[in-house]
Amino acid sequence: MGQAQIDTATALAELQETKPAKVTIVVLSGDMDRAMASLIIATGAAAMGMPVTMFFTFWGLNVIRKEGAATSAKDWLRRLFGLLNKGGAGTLPLSRFNFGGIGARMMKRVMKKSHMPGVPELLRMAQDLDVRLIACTTTLGLMGISKDTLIDGVDQLAGVSTYLAEAKDGSVNLFI
Amino acid sequence: MTQSDVKLDTLGYFCPMPIIMTSKKIKELTTGQVLEVWSDDEGIKKDMPAWCQTTGHEMVGLEEEQSNGKAIYKAFVKKTK
């Protein structure tokens, strides 16, 4: 019995030794502050040598949309939605105290003064550090976002199975 | 005073920048060399040992200095691989 326990512990240690801890982050939110938190964790983990995959879904897709890209949806409901739901890493609102964009602008000014990278800079950094960016196909369709309006470097379009296949090997799985 | 081979100035930068800059800079060193990272972000005191623990590099020292009433931290990281 005691022998078996030691073996398991050794096996686990060896596994951790050879396999770097994986990180997956689901980004559902398109708020600037939440996007920042997710990207700070992603870049930090990548800097620590951990493979990181970020899945963008629903409002989170706005983080990886090109700024000012027009919607290519056919039906009027989705087109209206695309007009209202603006994307782009630099245009995200704050989750609180946004005041029609004034709050976000003030926050950006403070961040610039204190050398803090904003969402566009963090996103570039994440790509430099080989963080995988995956866009959810279902919500792309639902929200009338076409894949050519996503930023370059989105590694793939995928669904829930891809996420789960990654997450089951992940030691850090976050939903933001 | 711990000796270092290469210096990295991250003064004025907040988390996660010092760690990201460290992970980039360490690639330029050869194994056995020591990188000296300057930071005024207090989080570095915990973050740099944690980064070393995860990446396998060796934390050989941490010094704290006061300059104009502000603390400056100097972390020494030895490249192990």
Image (cartoon, grey):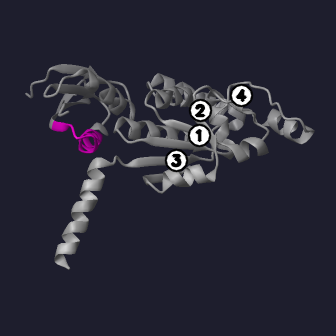
Graded by Cα atoms within 10 Å as few (under 14), some (14 to 19) or many (20 or more), the crowding at tag 2 reads some
**In the image, is A124 to the left or to the right of B64?**
right
Q: Which residue is mark 2?
A: A154
Extent of the magenta region: B45-59
Residue sitting at x 43%, y 30%: A129
Subunit ID for the residue under disc 1: A
Q: Chain of mark 4?
A: A
Q: CA distance from mark 2 to mark 1?
A: 6 Å
- The residue positioned 27% from the left and 43% from the top of the image is B46
Residue B58 magenta-highlighted = yes
The CA span between labels 3 and 4 is: 23 Å
Secondary structure at numbered mark 1: strand
Q: Nearer the viewer, residue B67 or B3?
A: B3
Q: Earlier in the sequence, mark 2 or mark 1?
A: 1
Q: Which label was assigned to residue A148? A: 4
Residue A96 position within the rendered picture, expressed as x and y whole percent measured from the top left = 63, 44
What is the x, y in percent for residue B66? 20, 29
Which residue is labeled 3 in the image? A25
As rendered, which of A95 and A8 lies closer to the eye?
A: A8
Can residue A97 be seen in the rendering of this structure? no
